[in-house]
Amino acid sequence: MPSKEQIALERQKLNQIIRRFFSDRGFVEVETPIVVQSPGMEPNLCPFETFVIEPNGTQYKAGLITSPEYSMKKLLGLGMQKIFTLTKVFRNEEELGGSHNPEFTMLEWYFQGADYQMCMDETQALVEVCAQEFGASLPIFDRKRVRDLFLEYTDVDLNKANSQMLRDACQRLSIHVVSTDTESDLFYRLFLARVEPQFSSGSIFVYDYPSYQAALSKLTADGVYGQRFELYVNGLELCNGFTELTDAKEQKKRFEEEAQERIQSQKTIFPIDETLLRLLPSVQQPSYGNALGVDRLHMVITGRASIKDVLLFPASTLFTNKI
């Protein structure tokens, strides 16, 4: 078990490496708000909810950000070209331990004029620099399309698969499903049960997710997949990157679809960020963005298996009054 001082010194060093990496590449560090009106629309996430109250009693429903993404994209729309931020983000209904903590540190960066392929290159360079500075060795990096992984490990062709075919595959592979599962839910069940376990060793970029998993990413030319990737190192998911969607009409449609999924899951619906939609068309194409968990990167480069071993105040002890 590392001492608190050791953890603090390691994090200070890691933050310095990250800031130097982006400064050397011409990025500007920005600060974004934590308490906002629209903290996130993703159906699988649960923001912490609160109110902003004026002295006269006027109340505004708000939440703590699950990601600084909306604010970062607004800055792109306002003309900034290469930006990054190190910020706290918050996700409720998460485990208190393992690789999860309800409050964690996220690195996000954006670049107008490049796509997700270049972002993968840059992400690999960042992770390799951090590992080198800490004297850690990493497995050789690989890249695989989600479709190829599904063909190999589930015998499902995502070019042809519909909701019923995904449900049939779950039943064939003895994966539990429920009647309300959406196509996205079924994909995720298959991915978690059969694909993700294959990443237990190695460094792998998994890219081109089905359109219903595209989130805020631009679609591929055929419209079937989102230009989105995730990086896994020795089984630990480190980041989620995109070629950014800048079509405001399409983005609003996706937000509305996600709102309906949240309703079906009986989760709070936050208002669509209309300022983001107004500024999106001003973002240059292509542009990429990436969100990387700094605590998990800290785990990877120090060889620690639990997030509590890289935090000064992990939630697993914070809420049980133990240090």
Image (cartoon, rainbow, N blue to C red):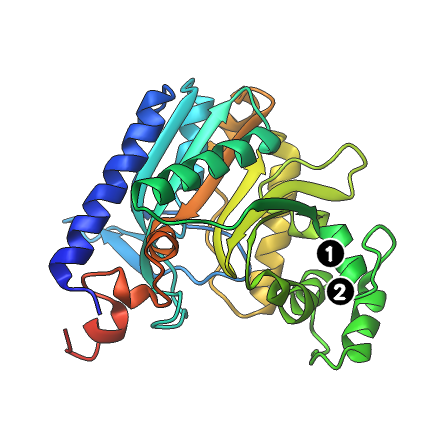
Please name the amino acid that badge 2 sits on: Tyr
Residue position marked by numbered label 2 in the rendering: 153
**Residue at the (56%, 23%) spot, across then down:** 114
Local packing at callout 1 (Cα closer than 10 Å; few below 14, some 14-19, many 20+) is: many
In which quadrant is the N terminus drawn? bottom left
Expressed as whole percent of the image width and height from the top left, the position of residue 249 reads: 65, 34
**Residue at the (39%, 72%) spot, across then down:** 95
**Residue at the (31%, 36%) spot, across then down:** 18
Q: Nearer the viewer, residue 19 or 130?
A: 130
Residue 30 in view (yes/no): no
**Residue at the (81%, 58%) spot, across then down:** 151
Q: Is 25 above or below relative to 263? A: above
Residue 181 in view (yes/no): yes
Residue position marked by numbered label 1 in the rendering: 149
176 vs 203, left or right, is right
**Is mark 1 in CB contact (under 8 Å) with mark 2?**
yes
Please name the amino acid that badge 1 sits on: Leu
Outermost residue, left side = 5
Local packing at callout 2 (Cα closer than 10 Å; few below 14, some 14-19, many 20+) is: some
Q: Secondary structure at mark 1?
A: helix
Marks 1 and 2, how far apart at CA: 6 Å
